[in-house]
Amino acid sequence: MLNIGVLNQGIVIDHIKVGGAMKIYTYLDLENLDCSVAIIKNARSNKMGRKDIIKIEGTLEGINLDILGALDHKITINVIKDGKIIEKKNTKLPDKVSNILKCKNPRCISSIEHGITHSFKLTDRKNGIYRCVYCEHAFERLAFERMSNLSVNI
């Protein structure tokens, strides 16, 4: 059995859909932080069957955890201090996301022009519907969840 050490200070991102940890690693820009990161893929879970987990040791400066809700609203975040969980957070859908979702409208300026930020605003929290800020094209969160393993930027 794999044994990953206990964190003294940091966060544990838990309940990630299998295969989603590497995408979250990229979206959180963890490769550019000066901290230890452990990625556990395909771990056994009583709740989910299988899951991915990310452990980040150190301070949380520079980590934008708000985007996790757009990637998967079932992810949980455990804040660790002195080796103990001091806070458990459930992710929620952020009001606005940038450069995570891509507009599928071929006429949208974000699809035509290079270098434009892909921005979406949440317009229906209950159904998880985001709309492009440029053309109002809908991106449905529920359809997004049915796609395989956090296949964002589609």
Image (cartoon, rainbow, N blue to C red):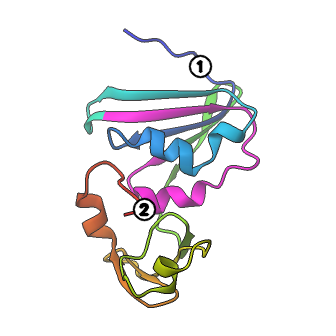
Residue at 55% x, 45% y: name it.
26
The x, y position of residue 49, in whole percent, is 23, 34
Report if residue 77 is visible in the image: no
Q: Which mark is residue 6?
A: 1
Foreground residue among 21 and 31:
31
Which numbered disc, 2 or 1, marks the residue that appears first in the sequence? 1
What stretch of residues is rendered in magenta? 51-77
Q: Residues within 10 Å of mark 1 (few under 14, many from 20)?
A: few
Vertically, is 106 above or below 75? Answer: below
Which residue in the protein does label 2 denote?
153
Q: Is 71 within the magenta?
A: yes
Vertically, is 84 above or below 72? Answer: above
User: Which image quadrant: the N terminus?
Assistant: top left
Foreground residue among 69 and 148:
148
Going by the numbered disc 1, the residue's amino acid type is Val
The x, y position of residue 47, in whole percent, is 27, 38
The x, y position of residue 58, in whole percent, is 73, 32
Q: Which mark is residue 42?
A: none
Q: Is 35 within the magenta?
A: no
Residue at 72% x, 38% y: name it.
33
Which secondary structure lies at badge 1? loop
Q: Is residue 104 left or right of residue 55?
A: left
Residue at 25% x, 68% y: name it.
143
